[in-house]
Image: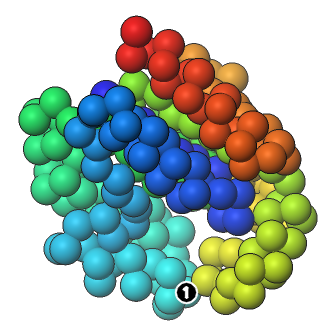
Amino acid sequence: MFITFEGIDGIGKSTQALRLKAWLEKLNYEVIYTFEPGGCELSKGVRELLLSGNIKDDIARLILFLGDRKLHVDKVIKPALDLNKIVICDRYNLSSIAYQSVNLDYKFVKEFVKSFNFVEPDINLFLDIKAEDALKRLENRGHAKDNIESEGVKYLNAVNENYKKLAEENNKIIVIDANKSELEIANLIKNYVNKILK
């Protein structure tokens, strides 16, 4: 099974992904947790480059994200799935579309990402929250903003709206209210994943 966690930063994606991993391991599944960008050794430098803010061109950024994903799929995701492991990934295709189509044409980005024929997740868990609330959480954690988070509330709310648009078009995207408590969210996620396992 291939599970992705999606949404803007500050919503607890990593926390929930690791909780899910621990729960599945208790059920005796072999699970790997990974993330994008920079989820394999070869692409760590790509992550630093993308989050540095030095790449200003939107097309160049999109191509870098997809190049990073190609390496990640080939070196980490596909080999694990071939061994019948469960893969949990923090960000994947939906992130590229939701973020990059704020400044680029939505249909173009969606079709361009689709043209790479990356392995499709069995379930995409989109944690939905307003940008104002997500940024507040980041501030409370003392988290230093990267260049994407520094784009501000208007940009991040536009990203979130793109996620919602994607969810309307794809029944493998599960929308979860990220304003709920950590435990409530974890239980909702377990229920969705359990249905697929059965």
Q: Is residue 67 left or right of residue 95?
A: left
Determine the residue positioned at 45% across, 78% down: 50
Location of residue 173 by image quarter: top right
Q: Is residue 38 left or right of residue 58?
A: left
Q: Is residue 87 left or right of residue 15?
A: left
Q: Residues within 10 Å of mark 1 (few under 14, many from 20)?
A: few
Determine the residue positioned at 39% across, 66% down: 37
- Nearest the eye: 135 or 147: 135
Q: Is residue 63 visible?
A: no
Residue with the mark numbered 1: 53
Task: Locate the C terminus by quadrant.
Answer: top left
Determine the residue positioned at 34% across, 40% down: 25
Residue that protrudes farthest toward the top in the picture = 198
Q: Is residue 157 above or below residue 189?
A: below
Q: Residue 157, how many percent across, how many down?
A: 81, 56
Residue that protrudes farthest toward the front in the picture = 26
Q: Is residue 130 visible?
A: yes
Residue type at mark 1 is Gly
Q: Is residue 166 above or below residue 51?
A: above
Q: Residue 4, how many percent across, how many down?
A: 46, 41
Q: Residue 65, how many percent across, how many down?
A: 39, 63
Task: Locate the N terminus by quadrant.
Answer: top left
Q: Secondary structure at mark 1?
A: loop
Determine the residue positioned at 60% across, 32% down: 189
